[in-house]
Image: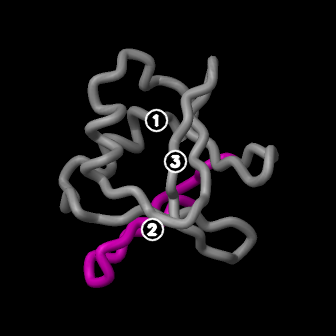
């Protein structure tokens, strides 16, 4: 998924929505997004980022056309979709 498409998908969502990552049928908090020379890497951790944090960090970046991938211990996995649960206040990258 292209990072600018990801930002468009989450544009109308609540700013307090928490983000998670699904890796091999397990769900982990999305705690950090790093910018490499040609991609954005979503990293699992202990605390989940909110939409507000993501937009504050990356909303005005010029290189948002880079690919968003999940970093699983050095293995870069593609992001194919986003599962949103309004009731739980969560969104999961898959």
CA–CA distance in space, label 3 to label 1: 14 Å
Q: Nearer the viewer, residue 65 or 34?
A: 34
Q: Helix, strand, or loop for circle 1?
A: helix
* Residue in the image at 46% along x and 60% along y: 82
CA–CA distance in space, label 2 to label 1: 16 Å
Q: Position of residue 87 (x, y in %)?
A: 27, 83
* Residue in the image at 55% along x and 35% along y: 34
User: Is 82 covered by the magenta stretch?
Assistant: yes
Which residue is under mark 2?
A: 83
CA–CA distance in space, label 2 to label 3: 19 Å
The image shows residue 65, relative to residue 82, as above or below, that is above
Taking 13 as reference, is 31 left or right? right
Total residue callouts:
3
Name the quadrant containing residue 16: bottom left
Name the quadrant containing residue 21: bottom right
Q: Quadrant of the N terminus?
A: top right
Q: Which residues are magenta?
A: 78-94
Label 2 CA crowd tier, 10 Å (few <14, some 14–19, many 20+):
some
Label placed on residue 3: 1
Q: Quadrant of the C terminus?
A: bottom right
Which residue is under mark 3?
A: 32
């Amino acid at each position: 998924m292209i990072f600018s498409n990801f930002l468009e998908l989450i544009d109308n969502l609540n700013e307090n929505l928490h983000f998670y990552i699904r890796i091999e049928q397990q769900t982990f908090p999305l705690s950090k997004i790093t910018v490499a020379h040609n991609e954005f890497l979503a990293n699992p951790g202990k605390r989940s980022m909110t939409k507000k944090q993501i937009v504050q960090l990356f909303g005005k970046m010029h290189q948002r056309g880079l690919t968003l991938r999940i970093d699983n211990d050095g293995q870069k996995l593609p992001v194919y979709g986003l599962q949103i649960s309004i009731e739980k206040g969560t969104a999961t990258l898959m």
